[in-house]
Each structure stands twice: as structure tokens, then as C-alpha cells.
Image (spheres, grey):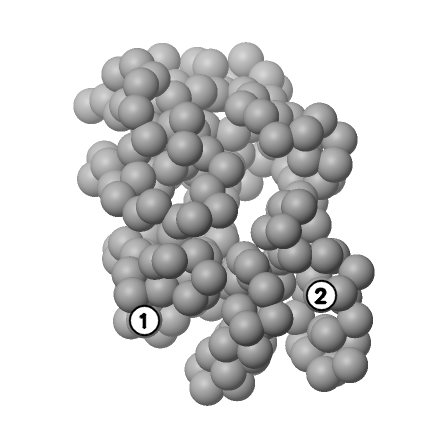
Amino acid sequence: MSLRIFEIFYSLQGESSRVGLPTVFVRLTGCPLRCGYCDTEYAFNGGATKSFEEILAKVASFQARYVCVTGGEPLAQKDCHELLKLLCDAGYNVSIETSGAMDISQLDQRVSVIMDIKTPGSGEASKNLWSNIASLSAKDEVKFVLVDRSDYEWAKQILSHYDLSKNCHVLFSPVYKTLSPTDLASWILEDCLPVRMQVQLHKILWGEKAGV
């Protein structure tokens, strides 16, 4: 079995509750969504087909505890499920970053899901697969990437409607260089929201580029 891989690299996790942890990233090629703020358009195409043995060997070479499978949209490649299982079997602490447009109900239960809920500002809110919310548990996280105040107000409504913070961690993230992190922080505090605000640590450290 094999997958189309754009890159495998070692860096600090820049997002989620695992921010700052040394992590191996396995970035799969391809994504069916086209969010207006996408920062990984370079991974829509290209990369190389690699066997699971090659992928696991490369991951092992970094001697890290944490592995994040990302994209693009990793679940757009059906064999991603098997890779996640193998990584868990190998003893890694595994997470997956997914758009929320693909079914997560069949994922290995050992995997921590970091799932976007696409806001209107992304241009892809119609792609949200709302049934995914029922599959989330306390080890998982939901992320709202916010373009502006309108996105924030929309995300508040979704947060309340689904009572998300009682089921999993909820992340509010400003689009890099578009929404002021200071403004978002103020809104969250004013509204006493039960969410974690995050900024993208890797972009603060190294800028907006591949391989970080």
C-alpha cells in the first residue's frame, strides 16, 4: 500500500493544544477544498508516491514521539486510515489535521482529531460535514479559522448550538496577517468564551513557507 506524500519533516507543532511540541509532520498531497486563506496550496499537487514502509522509516529517523498527519486534506486518500493505524501501532502519539469535509467516524480511536469547521469567510462553509461532530471525543479538537468579526460571530453561534466545548477542545485562530490576534483575544475575553485562542507559532518563528 502507498500514499502520495508531499513532504515529511520535523518541526515544532505550531497549532492545537500540542503547540510547541517537537513533531514529525507527514503531509499528504491533494485537497478537494479551496479555502480563500489556504496556506498549503503548494500541496494540492506534486509530491511522490511512497510505500508505507518508506513513510514509517522516514518518520522513525527523526526519533520523535509525536506525529501529525496533515495536508492538503489527508483523508482524501483512502489509505490514510491504514497509515494512521500503523503509526499508532508503532507507539507514536498520533494526530490528524482534517478539514471537516471528510467522514471521521471510521478513524482509529487512538488518533487525536484536529478538525476544522469552515467558516463563511473561508468560502467553503457549505462543505462542512456536520455529522462529524457526533464522532468527536475529549481527546479531539475543533478549530475555527477566522477571517473577520463576522466569522467570529458565526463561530460563536456554532459553538453554542452544538455545545462543542463540552465534548472536545475548541480552538479559535485568526487568519495570519488578516485578522488581528489582539482583536480576537479581546472578543474572546469580552464574551467569556470557553475556547483556546491560538496563533500559528511556526509562522511567527519561520514565516509562511513549506517545511516548517
Residue 47 in view here = yes
- The residue type indicated by label 1 comes to Trp
x, y percentage for residue 1? 20, 23
According to the image, label 1 marks what residue?
130
- 133 and 129: which one is in front? 129
- The residue type indicated by label 2 comes to Leu
Q: Is residue 81 above or below residue 16?
A: above
Identify the residue at horizontal 45%, vertical 28% (top origin).
26
Which quadrant of the view contains residue 119? bottom left
* In the image: residue 31, left or right of residue 206: left
Q: In this view, does 61 lie above or below 40?
A: above
Identify the residue at horizontal 56%, vertical 78% (top origin).
153
x, y percentage for residue 141? 53, 60
Q: Which residue lies furthest to the bottom in this view?
A: 161
Q: Is residue 200 above or below residue 87?
A: below
- 205 and 55: which one is in front? 205
Q: What element carries label 1?
A: helix
Identify the residue at horizontal 56%, vertical 61% (top origin).
146
According to the image, label 2 marks what residue?
184
x, y percentage for residue 69? 44, 36
Residue 171 in view here = no
Q: Looking at the figure, which quarter contains the C terminus?
A: top right
* In the image: residue 31, left or right of residue 175: left
